[in-house]
Amino acid sequence: MIRTCGLGKIYSQGVHPVAALTGVTLHIPPGQFVAVMGPSGSGKSTLMNLLGCLDTPTSGTYMLDGVDVTRLGDVELAAVRNRKIGFVFQAFNLLPRMSAVRNVELPMLYAGVPPRERRERALKALEMVGLADRVHHRPSQLSGGQVQRVAIARAMVNNPVILLADEPTGNLDTRSGREVMAIFQELNRKGTTVVLVTHERDIALHASRILHFIDGRLVGDEKNGNPVQAAGGTGTGPHPDCRGEVAVP
Ligand code: ADP
Ligand code: MG
């Protein structure tokens, strides 16, 4: 599903360039539920933005669902984002003046789905996250946990192959956080690949695999609580085609 080789990102806007991510080689097979952990500033959001095609790497390659997305232009990338990726953010990022159902319809609008089908699929997605009775509420009329569930419905409505979530429970109370995690687990059980950033160990334990980042580097990989050796048939070693750091032109 996801294969990165020597993925790196250097931000060079400021006076001093920042190496936010360095040499990340990673394989995430379809159907896996992965948590990403690490201290603040360790590159977790940078990784998610690269995996979500919201940003482009300064080194390395990224294959998503068999496509080398590092070679795609902006228009093609936007299409990949819309069709293959669902993104859930800590800050929800819903449009405040639109009802829940209209927020969920938006990605289908961009994908060119006809109005009636948009409405049907949006209602179904809201039902899936337990909000069938809140579809005409605006975000300000919903609790934090409900707003995040609308955001999950929006992320899932185009049937993405992968769901990326950057600290989705970061703004939620414990109970709402648990509800949101239950939805992620259910989606994963039905086959969606999930990658989720969290700094809470309790939340990370919902995943079957935990990746640890420090200073922009992947420093640990545990499956079901056991450390995984970086090389040797675990699915985490470099792909035969991966020759380490490959400069992106
Ligand atoms: P995390 O999500 O783990 O807290 P980030 O990926 O947001 O970490 O940030 C990693 C490093 O990159 C930090 O040092 C941060 O200050 C820097 N950084 C993140 N985004 C930018 C940006 N747009 N421009 C410059 N530096 C950035
Ligand atoms: Mg972050």
Image (cartoon, helix red, strand yellow):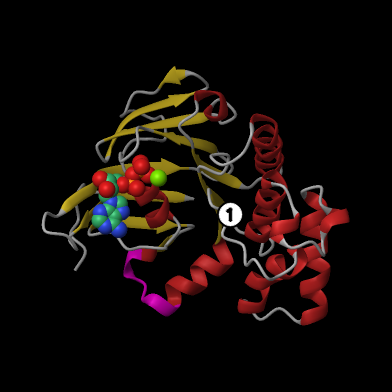
Q: Main secondary structure of the magenta part?
A: helix
Is 73 contained in the magenta span? yes
Is 204 contained in the magenta span? no
For the residue pair 70 and 207, the one nearer the viewer reads as 207
The residue drawn where x is 58% and y is 55% is: 161
The residue tagged 1 is 92
How far from the left and from the top, in percent, is residue 206? 60, 29
The extreme right residue here reads 133
Res. 106 image quadrant: bottom right
Q: Is 201 drawn above or below residue 52 in the view shown?
A: above
Does 167 sit left or right of 112 as displayed?
left
How far from the left and from the top, in percent, is residue 41? 30, 41
Range of the magenta residues?
A: 70-75
The residue drawn where x is 49% and y is 57% is: 65
For the residue pair 60 and 42, the one nearer the viewer reads as 42
The extreme top residue here reads 226
Does 42 sit left or right of 147 as displayed?
left
> Where is the C terminus found, in terms of image quarters?
bottom left
The extreme left residue here reads 15
Does 39 sit left or right of 96 as displayed?
left
Disc 1 marks which amino acid? Phe
| Quadrant where ligand 2 appears | top left
Q: Is 179 drawn above or below residue 9 in the view shown?
A: above
Crowd around label 1: few <14 · some 14–19 · many ≥20 (10 Å): many
